[in-house]
Image (cartoon, rainbow, N blue to C red):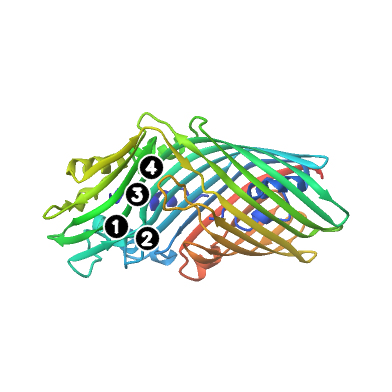
Amino acid sequence: MKKLIVPFFILSCVCTFAQEHFSGIGTSKRIGILNANFNPAELANLNSKMEVNLFATSINISNNKIGVSDITGDEDFEDLLFKGDEPVNLRFDVEIAGPGFAFKYKKMGFAITSKAYGKLNLVDIDANIGDAIANNGLNSLVNFTTLNGNYNQRLVGTTYGELGFSAARSLWETDKYKLNGGATFKLLFPGSYANFGADQFQGTITNVGGDSFLTNANASVNVAYSGSLGSSFSDFDGYSDSVFGSLNGFAVDFGGTFTIKDEKNGYKLNSGISVRNIGGMTFKDENNSSTNYNLVIQGNQSLNLSQFENVDSLQEVEQILVDSGFLTSTSSSEDFKVKLPTVLNAYADMQVIPTLYVSVFLQQKLTDDAKNDQITAQNVVTLTPRFSLKHFEVFAPLSQTEIAGFNAGIGFRVYGFFIGSGSAFTALINDSKQADFYFGYRFGMGKS
């Protein structure tokens, strides 16, 4: 199973030429399609009559174990990841915004957008299990380890595409105040999916002669896959090839904004609240499978965990476990539905002086990452001071994230081009456990 874990890290390195995506720029005073991604009601505040998004890419890698300085050391990735007893959480998220178009008409704003997503996550993986599979228990100080996980451990990946149709309207407006409402309706195109979940995992790992064996074990296991992620985690061409599948899902965003106007500088305060990604999608493919099992190993029985060391797919993992005789199927289906990561977004951007703004952004997930049919999200709080002119901005997002903790970054906007990172400073000056990067270009036409 070692190859099921290593690609999470390798793929992140390969893609770095690009979880709060677009940290800092998403609450920019230059209101456009990016702002509407966080809250569709912002479309009624567009700075231009029309805006075209050519491209925007954001990549976020975060974990709770490995710092940036550790990567350049002599220790292997698996040794670092599975040290200690704290469960392992690793998130790799990519968001690519393709061509998009927005425009204002009187009190209303509209947009058509396109996106592609890729997510590869380790969720609450017991470090002792990971060490036993990847390193034959080399990090263990004793010859046996007792497992008593009262949560669901997941290895999960997904790719999917999205077409969004958004509309917003000014609901109430005076010389000083403005209140907007808006919604986005999303058509979802599921690409590929893979999930291995082990809930309430209990047992004992014993190290004998350089191998690790699992005994006296019980767990509820889910194995689900569709598309290329089921047959291989290390075939990187498959990730990009499988992003857009057939139309088979639907989701919505709702939001509202409240603005205190400033005649010369746009606004003194721009605030909003939204609920995003309410919905899900159904995966269908020739290799589709979703099966729930009971894992039971009793008495003198044992499972040699070294069998999983070079495994490259969930199909192989499932077959090994089935052949061992320790799995009993409880339910199975070919097509299965996966829920999007529903989140609550709230923010406020306040003018301190005409060229200096400070924004506060909150992302609170409303779903449970432990569920096998759930795409994951992170809780995030970000404070962003920003120097803002009409055609230039520089901002420094300061974030506290659920997985990686505190991070500080920097970003720039020059006309429609922007580039930034939510972790650039902490990656340079301390042992940051997050690395992220984004860039893109959009342009506006006509004065709003």
Q: Could you tell me which residue is drawn at 40 percent across and 64 percent down?
A: 66
Mark nearer the viewer, 2 or 3: 3
The amino acid at mark 3 is Gly
The amino acid at mark 4 is Ala
Q: Which mark is residue 88?
A: 2
Is residue 313 in view from this perspective? no
Q: In the image, is residue 207 above or below residue 281?
A: below
Q: Nearer the viewer, residue 141 or 365?
A: 365
Q: Quadrant of residue 28?
A: bottom right
Residue 19: x percent and y percent?
A: 53, 55
Residue beneath label 3, please? 197
The amino acid at mark 2 is Val
Label 2 Cα crowd, 10 Å radius (few <14 / some 14-19 / many 20+): many
Q: CA distance from mark 3 to mark 4?
A: 10 Å
Q: Quadrant of the C terminus?
A: top right
- Label 3: element kind: strand
Is residue 38 in view from this perspective? yes
Q: In the image, is residue 219 above or below residue 406?
A: above
Q: CA distance from mark 1 to mark 4?
A: 18 Å
Whether residues under marks 1 and 2 lie with C-beta atoms below 8 angstroms apart, the answer is yes
